[in-house]
């Protein structure tokens, strides 16, 4: 009988996906030709496995592809991208798990040890996620690589506000810190798992030095700490924040936590981490030994023009066992950064998460991403940063109202003018008292707060 850790091949993992100095002196500074050659070798193994999976065989055969038609990454555009909608269609046609994972889930037939989690369900019904031991631990290693690059060190106390239960995030982050760093991990979870007031008590008691999670809730906890008479940065000695920061105002987040250094990283439940910010704070470095990333035009699926923003489409090179991933259109929008990195690293960089194309609202020809509005609100001293967008159809056009939490004395007209300057289009603004949107956004209970209610 083969057990989970028998299938991880830890020595091979560390050799093929190095961390720390071996990473910085190796793949992170390799030539573009060397990176491409490594990707091509790994892509060939991935394609051989993916053809064995019913989900891919069905989709690719339907467009006339046969094994051997895609010989290298130069042919990748022959492969139709897929999205979560296609995965959920697979689940509906082959309940309850779908046929995209490529393993037998019933009966006594041998199968590799599996980790099962789900997505958060932010954009709909949660999607089943399956990982084999190899790809699960590679994902863990790659996240630990990011934390180490950003400054996580031995002796740090890492307070995590990622959710647990079926959702993947909290378990994934815990495994990464536990298995591949020497830091102490405190799995506090969301506000519904450990109430916010208790979280700040625990941070103070255990001496939290690192916070990991989504920016919205991390910022909220700073306000809770101050309400309890604690000074973030002094009474709670946080020096580093790493998480899904997106377009958040970094200066405001840092100031809320007493000057802590802030770092972004990007990934999705299917793939694990894809890119991470480094010490230069100049975009997110793509883990190109593990992923091939393209940007696709929303709607058409064509490769976006140079310099244009597009949907992140990822091919995960190490997933050659359970649930191979070939051209997954995440619907998350970003753009490539083209200027050379000051660090001398040769890995390509992206700007980070800029919104979701399937959550985008077009107002008078202008694309507005509700998840990015928080960064603009940070510029107004009376706004708390909490908000909710509502979209309605009025006559022959769409209109957006932003419900903004603000302190006494705030002026809706001023905030509206600020948003108009930054968004390039006018939106209505309604003011609410601090805390008034919490029930609607789920800031205390969800990993990712709701920022858009579409009433069209």
Image: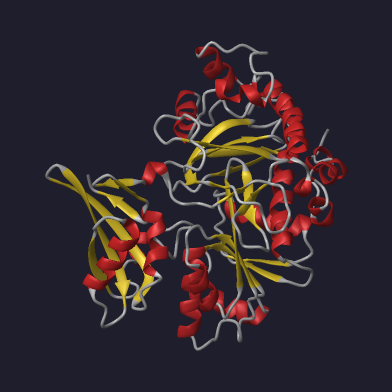
Residue 118: give x, y in percent of width and height.
54, 44
Left or right: residue 48 compared with residue 409: right
Which is more toward the observer, 173 or 410?
Answer: 410
Q: Is residue 1 above or below residue 259?
A: above
Q: Quadrant of the C terminus?
A: top left
Q: Residue at x 61, y 41 (%)?
A: 271
Q: Residue at x 35, y 61 (%)?
A: 422
Residues 214 and 97: in front is 214
In the current view of this chain or complex, which residue is farthest to the right?
11
Which percent across, then down, holds residue 144?
72, 56
Residue 28: x %, y % from top left: 75, 49
Can residue 285 be seen by looking at this rendering?
Answer: yes
Q: Is residue 192 visible?
A: no
Q: Quadrant of residue 451?
A: bottom left
Q: Quadrant of residue 100?
A: top right
Q: How is the image coloured?
A: secondary structure
Is residue 199 shown above or below 326?
below
């Amino acid at each position: 009988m083969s057990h989970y850790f028998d299938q991880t091949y830890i020595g091979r993992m560390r050799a093929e996906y190095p961390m720390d100095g071996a990473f910085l002196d190796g793949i992170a500074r390799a030539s573009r030709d060397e990176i491409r050659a490594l990707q091509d070798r790994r892509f060939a193994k991935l394609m051989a496995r993916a053809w064995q999976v019913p989900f891919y065989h069905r989709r690719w055969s339907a467009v006339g592809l046969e094994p051997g038609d895609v010989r290298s990454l130069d042919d990748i555009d022959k492969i139709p991208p897929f999205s979560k909608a296609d995965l959920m269609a697979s689940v509906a046609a082959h309940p309850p798990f779908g046929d995209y994972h490529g393993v037998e889930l019933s009966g006594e037939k041998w199968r590799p040890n599996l980790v099962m989690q789900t997505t958060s369900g932010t954009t709909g019904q949660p999607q089943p996620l399956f990982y084999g031991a190899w790809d699960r631990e590679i994902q863990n290693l790659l996240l630990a690589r990011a934390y180490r690059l950003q400054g996580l060190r031995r002796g740090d106390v890492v307070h995590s506000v990622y959710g647990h239960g079926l959702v993947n995030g909290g378990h994934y982050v815990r495994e990464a810190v536990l298995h591949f760093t020497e830091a102490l991990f405190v799995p506090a979870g969301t506000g519904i798992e450990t109430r916010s007031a208790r979280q700040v008590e625990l941070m103070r008691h255990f001496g939290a030095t690192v916070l990991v999670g989504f920016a919205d809730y991390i910022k909220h906890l700073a306000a809770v700490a101050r309400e309890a008479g604690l000074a973030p940065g002094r009474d709670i000695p946080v020096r580093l924040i790493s998480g899904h920061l997106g377009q958040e105002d970094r200066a405001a987040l840092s100031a809320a936590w007493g000057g802590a250094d802030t770092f972004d990283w990007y990934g999705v439940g299917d793939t694990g981490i894809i890119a991470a910010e480094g010490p230069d704070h100049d975009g997110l470095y793509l883990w190109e030994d593990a992923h091939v990333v393209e940007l696709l035009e929303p709607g058409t699926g064509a490769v976006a023009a140079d310099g244009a923003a597009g949907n992140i489409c990822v091919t995960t090179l190490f997933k050659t066992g359970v649930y191979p991933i070939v051209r997954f259109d995440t619907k998350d929008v970003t753009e490539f950064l083209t200027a050379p990195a000051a660090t001398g690293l040769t890995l390509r960089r992206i700007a980070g998460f800029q919104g979701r194309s399937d959550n985008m609202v077009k107002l008078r020809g202008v694309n507005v991403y509700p998840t990015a509005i928080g960064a603009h609100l940070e510029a107004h001293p009376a706004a708390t940063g909490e908000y909710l967008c509502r979209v309605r159809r009025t006559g022959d056009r769409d209109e957006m109202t932003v419900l903004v939490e603000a302190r006494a004395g705030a002026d809706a007209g001023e905030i509206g003018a600020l948003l108009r300057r930054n968004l390039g289009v006018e939106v209505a603004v309604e003011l609410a008292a601090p805390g008034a949107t919490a029930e609607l956004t789920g800031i205390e209970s969800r990993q990712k707060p709701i920022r858009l209610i579409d009433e069209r």
